[in-house]
Image: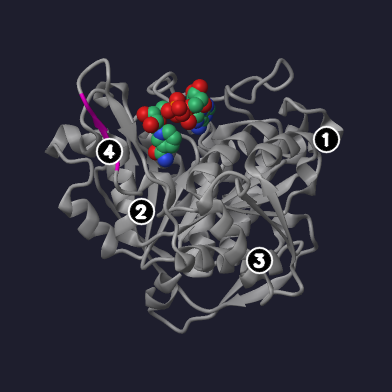
Amino acid sequence: MGAAASAVRPGKARLWCRDADFAGASHNFRYTDSQMLLNLTILPGDGIGPEVTEQAVLVLQTIAEAFSHQLQLQKKNIGGAALTAANDPLPPDTIQACLSSSAVLMGAVGSPAFDHYPNHLRPEAGLLRLRRELGAFANLRPAVSFPALEDTSPLRTEVVRGTNILIVRELLGGLYFGQPRSIEGAPGSRVAINTMSYGESEIERIARVAFDLARKRRKKVLSVDKANVLECSRLWREVVTRVGKDYPDVKLAHQYVDSAAMLLVQRPTDFDVVLTENMFGDILSDQAGGVVGSLGLLASASIGGVIGLYEPVHGSAPDIAGKGIANPLGAILSAAMLLRHSFGLESEALCIENAVSSSLDEGYRTADLASAKNPAISTSAMGQRVAETVRVSRSLPQ
Ligand SMILES: NC(=O)c1ccc[n+]([C@@H]2O[C@H](COP(=O)([O-])OP(=O)(O)OC[C@H]3O[C@@H](n4cnc5c(N)ncnc54)[C@H](O)[C@@H]3O)[C@@H](O)[C@H]2O)c1
């Protein structure tokens, strides 16, 4: 968020731009402020990460051209790619590049080749360190049912229609970061320990993010915990309830995580903003991906620190890597979130989201969403389709 302020606006030139072409509204016109410097670090990572990131970059390049922004990219290694190159899943030059840019776009990390490595030398350790280095404590994960994809949900159409959930997941606390953590003892009698720990200030700051975002949506926050069993959850519920009193216009409810998981498939349209801790959010957001059709569609923004980090929710998908069949839409929609949250470029973000939506309306599908009626196109064909839709809607030459 702070990055928006540091983004360079080199000139005062004001441009006419069509703003609402993509929402099906009549053509509204507006002034944009000026050209912006979009100074980004790109971290393709492992598996399908490079494939989907390439398409997100293509769409960002098209947006930069269409809205007269200047795109400045530097590509760095993370995860398994960085382990191979430098024996470190998050090398110092990657951290430096991220901290010197205005936002970071990542693909995914993880590879079976490193599964036997010690914890601190696994690809995922690089990503956790990066989130901490950037101070990105608030992970926003929207799960939206696109009208064209209602029939790809495993749920009945009438159950999934209209689903629009924003999961606000705490990202720097809980079991993924708590100390002590270890596996100790002799083989056969080893004991493994992880620690879940949350402080009041950590809970309060993520709760405020959720309530602030709910105010811009349907004004409902569902706080998900396990307060009947866990002390962390009891404190969580107490602090969230206290913060909620500052937002009397937002309706707050609490739910245990097990029953929230059940309700998510029974009545997904009841959910607006879901506020939850790190691991519960990790699990519920993948489930939400299944509800709306494919994990490959889900985007995320990790904000709240010095620099925003944007990445699709899915992992490196080694089972389909290198085949050109991965769905790039989660990565492309993450680029939209980057423009919105790190640069305040709402029209540009909407332009991407509407190009994705209309590409799906026209029947374009990657393998994860294809059917007899809508056969699969490749990862790159889908990226090009979205980019072309942006070009057409902005009246750029093809
Ligand atoms: N943020 C991240 O980088 C992140 C997140 C989750 C998992 N991981 C890592 O990724 C690796 C694989 O983990 P996993 O298999 O549990 O999860 P995954 O998300 O990579 O894959 C789960 C399933 O979804 C499919 N899938 C995922 N993304 C897709 C896409 N864009 N298009 C089409 N299908 C897609 C995969 O083919 C697979 O069948 C592991 O090393 C894990 O640690 C990384």
State the residue position of label 4: 79
Q: Are marks 2 and 4 in contact (CB under 8 Å)?
A: no
Residue 72 in which image quadrant:
bottom left
Q: Quick one: 196 or 186, which is closer to the camera?
A: 186
Q: Which x, y percent locates residue 85?
A: 15, 36
Residue in view at x 31 percent, y 48 percent? 179
Secondary element under disc 2, as helix, strand or loop, is: helix
For label 3, count other residues whose C-alpha is less than 10 Å away and answer few (under 14), some (14-19) or many (20+): some
State the residue position of label 2: 131
On screen, residue 256 versus residue 116, left or right, reads right
Within 8 Å: ligand 1 and the Cβ of disc 4? yes
Please tell me the numbered disc located at residue 146.
none
Vertical position of residue 236 compared to residue 331: above or below: below
The main secondary structure of the magenta stretch is strand
> Which badge, 4 or 3, comes first in the chain's sequence?
4
State the residue position of label 1: 159
Secondary element under disc 4, as helix, strand or loop, is: loop
Residue in view at x 40 percent, y 59 percent? 136
